[in-house]
Image (spheres, grey):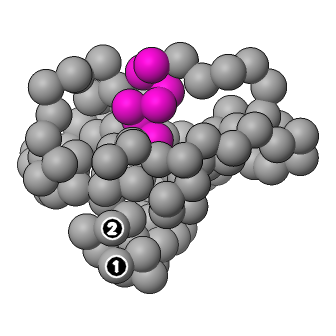
Amino acid sequence: MLPIIIHTRRFPPKRFHAITLFPFVFHNGEPLTESEIRHETIHMWQQLAFIFVGFYLIYLVAWLVNLIRYRDSFKAYLNIPFERYAYANEENTALTRSLMAFGWLGKPKNKQ
């Protein structure tokens, strides 16, 4: 299953090219590349695995902890475990649904 891609002018915020809100990927600007689609597909499976609300709670708490740790909102975003995993695997064409959903639970690597 792939996400439904929707091009918009005002969402997501300009600093971001795309955002996934299961099962939709909203993007602005240029069409998404294959790696960007894969990145957002990973988020779609993560959201499904954690029944949406769980995903957003973990995401928010991780971002807040990282914001305190890095004192920089973009570094905080890059070091959310879901984001680290999606960025590290956006070129990986062999990911299974299970890995897309739960692969982020592996050993974390800081993206500084």
Do residues under tags 1 and 2 come within 8 Å of each other at their CB atoms?
A: yes
Q: Residue 79 magenta-drawn? A: no
Give the labeled residue for mark 2.
Answer: 48
**Residue at position x 46%, y 41% from top?**
40
Which residue is pictured at 75% across the width and 38% down the height? 7
The answer to which quarter of the image holds residue 47 is bottom left
Q: Is residue 90 visible?
A: yes
Relative to 68, is 38 on the left or the right? left
Q: Which residues are magenta?
A: 34-40
Residue linked to disc 1:
51
Along the viewing direction, whichever of 89 and 66 lies nearer the viewer: 89
At label 2, which amino acid type do we have?
Leu
Density class for disc 2 (Cα within 10 Å; few <14, some 14-19, many ≥20) is: some
Picture quarter with the C terminus: top left
Counting labels gives 2
Horizontal and vertical percent position of residue 99: 13, 46
Which amino acid, mark 1? Ile
Q: Secondary structure at mark 2?
A: helix
